[in-house]
Amino acid sequence: MSNLEPYIWGDAAVTYPDWKGTAQLDQRMTGKQLEEIIGLDDGWLVVGLDMGGGETRHDLRVLAVRPDQVPEGGGVLPVIAAQNGGEIPVTEFLVHNVDPYAVLRAITHMFELRLRISSTERLPIRIVEQGDLGL
């Protein structure tokens, strides 16, 4: 682990945000869970996924709460935040030797990503026609 100045994890950001959007994932409950897939299954609690990179490579990072910070019982995230000044302290792990999109597919029951050209950020987009494309 490296020593760093703690910082608040925020929204995705790139230098020139041509596209902006949102994503939601319904995690699969059958099969291997994320912690097992990435080799982090000793009581760590994963609370964030971060996928990004450039033109040649994308990386997967996971944000997880240390096992000694996870209390017994349910509803643990508000308890963790209350014990830490309203914040959830995590370790950020860079996951090596994986295709981040293969991990995403492995944990997904349903997934939706919506990006829009940034100049339409505050404008409604109405779908008025549908078509099909093939490559």
Image (cartoon, grey):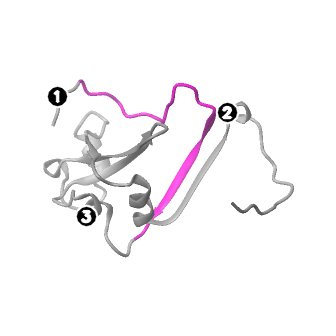
**What whole-number distance in Å separates the C-alpha atoms at marks 2 and 1?**
36 Å
Instruction: Please report the bounds of the magenta region as a residue range.
Output: 5-28
Q: Residues within 10 Å of mark 3 (few under 14, many from 20)?
A: few
Query: Residue 124: image x %, image y %?
Result: 77, 42
Query: Residue 53: image x %, image y %?
Result: 43, 38
According to the picture, the residue beneath numbered tag 3 turns out to be 36
The quarter holding residue 7 reads top left
Query: Residue 132: image x %, image y %?
Result: 77, 63
Q: Residues within 10 Å of mark 1 (few under 14, many from 20)?
A: few
Q: Residues within 10 Å of mark 2 (few under 14, many from 20)?
A: some
According to the picture, the residue beneath numbered tag 2 turns out to be 118
**104 and 89: which is toward the camera:** 104
Confirm whether the magenta stretch covers residue 7: yes
Q: Quadrant of the C terminus?
A: bottom right
What's the residue type where badge 2 is placed?
Ser
Instruction: Please give left or right for residue 87 compared with residue 22 in the image.
Output: left
User: Secondary structure of the magenta portion, mostly?
Assistant: loop
**What whole-number distance in Å separates the C-alpha atoms at marks 1 and 3?**
26 Å
Q: Quadrant of the N terminus?
A: top left
According to the picture, the residue beneath numbered tag 1 turns out to be 3
Q: Label for residue 25?
A: none
What's the residue type where badge 3 is placed?
Glu
User: Could you tell me which secondary element the residue under label 1 belongs to?
Assistant: loop
Residue at position x 40%, y 66% from top? Answer: 106
**What whole-number distance in Å separates the C-alpha atoms at marks 3 and 2?**
37 Å
Confirm whether the magenta stretch covers residue 103: no
